[in-house]
Image: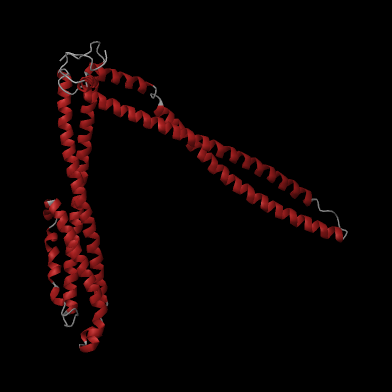
Amino acid sequence: RKFGTDRYSIYTPREQLRQHMNSYDYLRSRYFSLEEQLREYEHVDERLSQAEGLLRITSDQIRNLEKETKSAELSLKINEFKLQEAESNTILKLVRREKYDVKVEKWRNVAEEDRKALKHLQEELRERQRNRSDSEEALEQAKRLVDRRNQLEQQRKELLEQTFQGNLGDAAETHWEAERNTFRLVYEESLKRSNEQARGLRYLEKAKEQMAAGHARLRIALHMNTVGLYAGGLLSLFASAPTNKFMREAKLLHDNAQSSFKEAVEINPELLDAQAAVINFPAFLSFANIFIDGWIVDFAARQKMDKAIKESGMAMKGVNAAHTHQISFCAKLRAAVEQNRQDLDNAEEMLERERVRLIHRQYALPVC
């Protein structure tokens, strides 16, 4: 009977068709059809492994033949050169009416053998290269089959999920569905937290890099101080210019490092307890009194720069400690994510096993 021909139905033909498409019997028949298609792809993994192994062997053979061919070409060139030398010596001996040199025949035979060996290697190399093309094509075909199998497998899982929407399962199926849903929530939450802390780790890596660069510029600025820097007047003004350039760069890098560190602390407040030296991180930024109109003009500049370098070093140690702490923290989170992923996979496997058992029952509908 065609859909829509039931004159007593309260549903429209489109609604009747939709109900049929969502009915258990129809979904069950589609599931069996997918299972039948998947049987044709049972050995695709083995085929893929064989294709990869054959291509790997062929590639190794080609590399070895290429080395042997280059060696044979070099040997041929050497022997041809020796043959030319022998022929030249023979011509001179003939001119001088001396005895014929038998070495010419020797090197001619050696060169001829080298040519034959080289020709054989070149032919074998071309044959292996043709075989590699065939192996690459076989590998691509095996990959396409694996991709098609994976698509069908995904469709099968989605159809199985659609088939058991509602209350069609028995107690075991209902139990594993609840377990699956619980583990999925736990896994998604742990994955979200792990990704967030990984973002904090990237901020710390950036802060660590900027802090190290700023500290290096401070040390350069310290070693650039000269007598002229403390002489006062225009000489001091001129001598302090390159020094202040590095100081300004160091201050900018430390500001950026502090900003990155604050971003990391917002993501993981535990970083404040990772190392007490982190508290000294903003202290260096308060040494702005060494700048007067952009120039270092007081005689205490070296002392203040030494103190700034010390504070910068302490802050750098604190950032490094926080970075180490965050690496360990992220590793623990990744381990938890992996464990939750395994628990979810196990629950999904058990749920799928129960649903496959139910759908293969003799009756059209599973017993609730």
Residue 260 place in picture, x, y as percent: 18, 58
Relative to 114, is 39 on the left or the right?
Answer: left
Instruction: Give coordinates of residue 334: x percent, y percent.
Output: 22, 42
* Residue name at image x 14 percent, y 63 percent: 281
| The C terminus - image quarter | top left
**Looking at the image, how many numbered discs can be counted on the residues?**
0
* Above or below, 274 relative to 68: below
Image quadrant holding the N terminus, namely: top left
Q: Nearer the viewer, residue 263 or 209?
A: 263
- The answer to whether any part of residue 245 appears in the image is yes
Outermost residue, front side: 7
Please, is residue 147 above or below residue 117 in the view?
Answer: above
Q: Quick check: 199 above or below 294?
A: above
Q: Position of residue 60 (x, y in %)?
A: 51, 40
Q: Residue at x 11, y 55 (%)?
A: 272
What colour scheme has been applied to the protein in the rendered image? Answer: secondary structure
Residue 326 placed where, x, y %? 19, 51
Residue at point 18%, 42% (across, down) = 192
Extreme top residue here?
Answer: 362
Given residues 171 and 106, the one toward you in this image is: 171
Quadrant hosting residue 46: top left
Q: Nearer the viewer, residue 110 or 283?
A: 283
In the rendered image, the vertical position of residue 74 relative to residue 280, given as above or below: above
Farthest right residue? 97
Q: Is residue 227 visible?
A: no
